[in-house]
Image (cartoon, grey):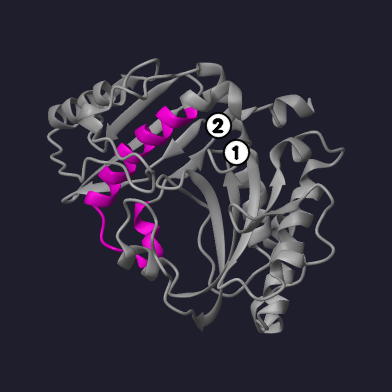
Amino acid sequence: MTSEIWPALPFADWKATCATLHMWTQIVGKIRLSKSTWLNHSWHVVLYVTPRGLTTSPIYEGTRPFQIDFDFVDHRLIIATADHSTRVVALGPCSVASFYGEIVSALHELDIETHISASPNEVAESIPFAQDEKHAAYDADAAHRFGRVLVQSDRLFKEFRTRFIGKCSPVHFFWGSFDLAVTRFSGRPAPPHPGGVPHLPDPVTREAYSHEVSSCGFWPGGDALPEPVYYSYAYPSPPGFEKAKGIPGAAFFSDALREWVLPYEAVRTAGAPDDLLLDFLQRTYAAAADLAKWDRAALEHGNGPLLSPAALRN
């Protein structure tokens, strides 16, 4: 049962599919970006986890809403409007160029005109979508397992989020960095971020990190660390954070990423995966907040939700 809830996701087995999905989510995310008013820290560009994959949530073409969903169960991309019009793009082995063309055609058929910056961000090699024949892999089973990992991560990140009453992001998926994240804020301004993220304007990065944060998330892996991990970092990183004590033994500080990481494999094979992940999130946050002297008494609410479902029924 544990293997069904927490499926194996070895990065080497689905590296090519992961890279293709990264580009596909960038296309969809940029459509949302092109139709959205700017929201602090780029929260207007994100995707959200669903029971079947990822969604843009409602986007507006004037007064007309539409939504784009990745379905990693039936392996479809669904574009649906409020007037019951729908277009479906099959998810299967297909180049980014072909996928991009199908989405543009589907939107045109639905009378949705979208003009995006048609090259990916936050990657070393930024191939324009319409020219990208390099990324074309799609392992349906791996994509399904990835979706299931997102669901469990989303569930526990939302539980972790309830313990904090200061400013906190939603749990959301950033298609640029291809990770699911939730971020807490101390309320204090941060020093200007140095920028330097590949193919991302420095002003965007600096606005994202305009205030002190402790951020955690799930990342499926990449060249810097070829395995799926949970991570936790602070900006600015307080002195001593990399040597924090009491972090769960399976976790380690990655010099390459400059953050604490907990291998997904350690979580999924643990006797109590929920407890291990929540302990990692709490201990790394506490280390960052204590070392940076956050006002934790004003920002936190114990170890559980403000109100339980039972309390709301009474």
**Which quadrant of the structure image shows residue 101?**
top left
- Examine the rendering and report whether any part of residue 158 can be seen: yes
Q: On the picture, is 101 further left or further right than 228? A: left
> For the residue marked with disc 2, what is the amino acid?
Gly
Task: From the top left corner, tell me how far across and down residue 28 is, in percent.
Answer: 32, 38
Task: From the top left corner, tell me how far across and down residue 30 is, in percent.
Answer: 28, 45
Disc 1 to disc 2: CB gap under 8 Å: yes
Is-magenta flag for residue 67? no
Query: Under tag 2, what secondary structure?
Result: helix
Is-magenta flag for residue 24? yes
Identify the magenta region: 18-45
Q: In this view, does 226 lie above or below 209?
A: above
Residue sitting at x 63%, y 58%? 259
Q: On the picture, is 204 further left or further right than 189? A: left
In the picture of the structure, the residue carrying the numbered disc 1 is 151
- Determine the main secondary structure of the stretch shown in magenta: helix
Q: In this view, does 74 lie above or below 295?
A: above
